[in-house]
Image (cartoon, rainbow, N blue to C red):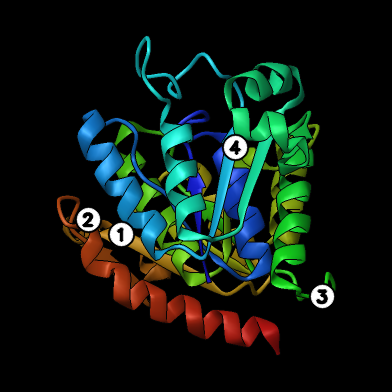
Amino acid sequence: MRVFVSGAAIGPGEYRQAAFDACVQVGVIPIATDYRAARSEILHAAYGAIDEADIYIAVVRELHDAAHPGEGCQSFTEMEYERADKKGIPCLVFVRAQERGELLSRFKRFERQPSLVTEFRSVDELRAQITAALFAVLGAPSTKEEAKSVLLLLPRNWRSENLRHFLSDTLVQAGVVGYLLDEVAGSVRTNLLTDAMDRADIVIADITDRNPNVMYELGHAHCLRKPTIILAESTSMDSIPSDLCGNDILTYDRGNIGSIQRPLARFLQEHTRRAAR
């Protein structure tokens, strides 16, 4: 099952990630479009994705942002919703509580059927509501096994941004939930690491720059015998510490990160099966 997640009014941040996490939890595949392109390109991509989707989700955080491309024009959210509605697939709309009144007045369909709209007040509440709504639509039991979690150990620098986005997309397609160390709540960094490792079923670490934090965190994962997938740029292999040379290291070229998508997916599949045993 494929679920189109409209990001016109939320962008690529924590609200969209909450929707993606909920989809993975339920066992469906989230799909979305990039809203940084030209308007015509966005609509073409969105319509194509909606035509392939089984469920449509719209999350509206602020109505005055990217959802409104111009005075007198329909918003992207409106046009996407109409496309999904005409297709006849279930449409789930979630709106931040502060924006409900304006949403109902702008979308006449919602004003006539306010039950179509679910309010949320926080990211956690949004994630829980989407999960419950998807279970209701799919008729799936709420006792479904929780999706496997992958902790990403990446250095904090501009060069890791493309890798982070690539890994996030690959993990979603593999049906697992990925998160960074800084996304785990904790009082001090040592507690963050402990909590993050406890939560992780699999660890992915990029050791290209031999970043001290990443190396320490990877060592912690090895001590806990966590399944690990080690990544490194092919040009950095000569400087990899000898203690790691006995591990399988998946190498990539910075200009063609996508080349490791298939082997990475295979590693994830194998480690996920092991974690389930």
Which residue has dot 2 on it?
A: 236
Q: Mark 2 or mark 4: which comes first in sequence?
A: 4
Q: What residue type is labelled 2?
A: Ser
101 or 259, which is in the foreground?
Answer: 101
Q: Which residue is nearer to you in this view: 57 or 80?
A: 80
Mark 3 vs mark 1, CA separation in Å: 40 Å
Indicate the amino acid at tag 4. Answer: Val
Residue designated by label 3: 141
Specify whether residue 247 is in view.
no
**Relative to residue 74, is residue 56 drawn left or right?**
right
Would you say the residues marked 2 and 1 are in contact, meaning their CB atoms lie under 8 Å apart? yes
269 or 85, which lies in front? 85
Q: Which of marks 2 and 4 is in front?
A: 4
Q: Dividing the picture into quarters, in which one does residue 253 lie?
A: bottom left
Which residue, as the protein is rendered here, is positioned at the far front? 112
Q: In this view, does 101 lie above or below 259?
A: above
**Amino acid on which the number 3 mark rests in the picture:** Pro
Measure the C-alpha gap from mark 1 to mark 4: 36 Å
- Total labels: the figure holds 4
Q: Residue 232 carries which label?
A: 1
Q: Which of marks 3 and 4 is nearer the N terminus?
A: 4
What is the C-alpha distance between the residues marked 2 and 1? 7 Å
Mark 4 surroundings: few (<14), some (14-19) or many (≥20) residues within 10 A: many
Q: How crowded is mark 3: few (under 14 residues within 10 Å), some or many (20 or more)?
A: few
The residue type indicated by label 1 comes to Ala
Q: Nearer the viewer, mark 3 or mark 1?
A: 3
Nearer to us of marks 2 and 3 is: 3
Q: Which SS class for mark 4?
A: strand
In the picture of the structure, the residue carrying the numbered disc 4 is: 59
Residue 37 placed where, x, y %? Answer: 24, 32
Q: How far apart are marks 2 and 4 (CA)?
A: 42 Å
Judging from the image, what secondary structure is the residue with disc 1 in?
Answer: strand
